[in-house]
């Protein structure tokens, strides 16, 4: 494994996903969150816990890039392979997250649907970025 590519791809993915999540949740879904405020932690409490979310995103990004590296097929462009990877990982993570969140949290179905879409977008973009960074990396044994 090329450690430099692993670290660079992981940090890029973590930063981009964090920015996307901030836009999705902090701007686009703000109205829904305000309308359902009774089911969420108070903002001050969430703010104190947010750094743990960032750490989680960074750790997850390193794991995601590692999985990509281990399954790298070298078929087509790195971008296309990254998109395929992101789509599959998106399905793997976004379906259970959205469904179980809807089951456990008394949220509107619309919000769970948005969470599914956001999860897919995050992983597809992450996969594409990883694919671009790994585009000519040879698979290792």
Image (cartoon, rainbow, N blue to C red):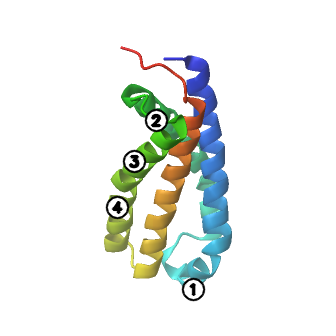
**Residue at 42 percent of width and 46 percent of height:** 84
What's the CA distance linking mark 1 and mark 3?
31 Å
**Residue at 52 percent of width and 81 percent of height:** 38
- Please state, as top left, top right, bottom left or bottom right, where the C terminus lies in the image: top left
Q: Which-is-in-front pick, marks 1 and 4?
A: 4
Q: Which-is-in-front pick, marks 1 and 2?
A: 2
Above or below, comparing residue 82 to residue 2 in the picture: below
Mark 1 and mark 3 lie on one chain; the one further toward the N terminus is 1
Residue on which disc 2 sits:
76
> Helix, strand, or loop for circle 3?
helix
Residue on which disc 4 sits:
95
Q: Label 2 crowding class (10 Å Cα cut-off): few <14, some 14-19, many 20+?
A: few
> Helix, strand, or loop for circle 2?
loop
Residue 35 tag number: 1
Q: Label 4 crowding class (10 Å Cα cut-off): few <14, some 14-19, many 20+?
A: some
Nearer to the camera, 6 or 130: 130
Q: Residue furthest bottom?
A: 35
Mark 4 and mark 2 lie on one chain; the one further toward the N terminus is 2
Q: Which-is-in-front pick, marks 2 and 3?
A: 2
Mark 1 and mark 4 lie on one chain; the one further toward the N terminus is 1
Residue on which disc 3 sits:
89
**Residue 37 locus on image (x, y percent):** 56, 80
């Amino acid at each position: 494994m090329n450690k430099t590519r692993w670290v660079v791809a992981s940090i890029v993915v973590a930063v981009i996903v964090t920015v996307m999540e901030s836009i999705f949740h902090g701007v686009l879904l703000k109205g829904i969150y305000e309308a359902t405020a009774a089911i969420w932690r108070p903002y001050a409490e969430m703010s104190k816990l947010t750094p743990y979310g960032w750490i989680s995103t960074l750790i997850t990004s390193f794991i995601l890039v590692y999985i990509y590296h281990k399954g790298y097929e070298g078929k087509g462009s790195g971008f296309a392979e990254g998109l395929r990877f992101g789509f599959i990982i998106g399905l793997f993570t976004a379906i259970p997250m959205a469904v179980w969140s809807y089951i456990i949290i008394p949220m509107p179905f619309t919000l769970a649907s948005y969470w599914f879409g956001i999860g897919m977008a995050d992983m597809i973009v992450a996969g594409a970025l990883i694919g671009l960074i790994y585009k000519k990396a040879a698979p290792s044994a």
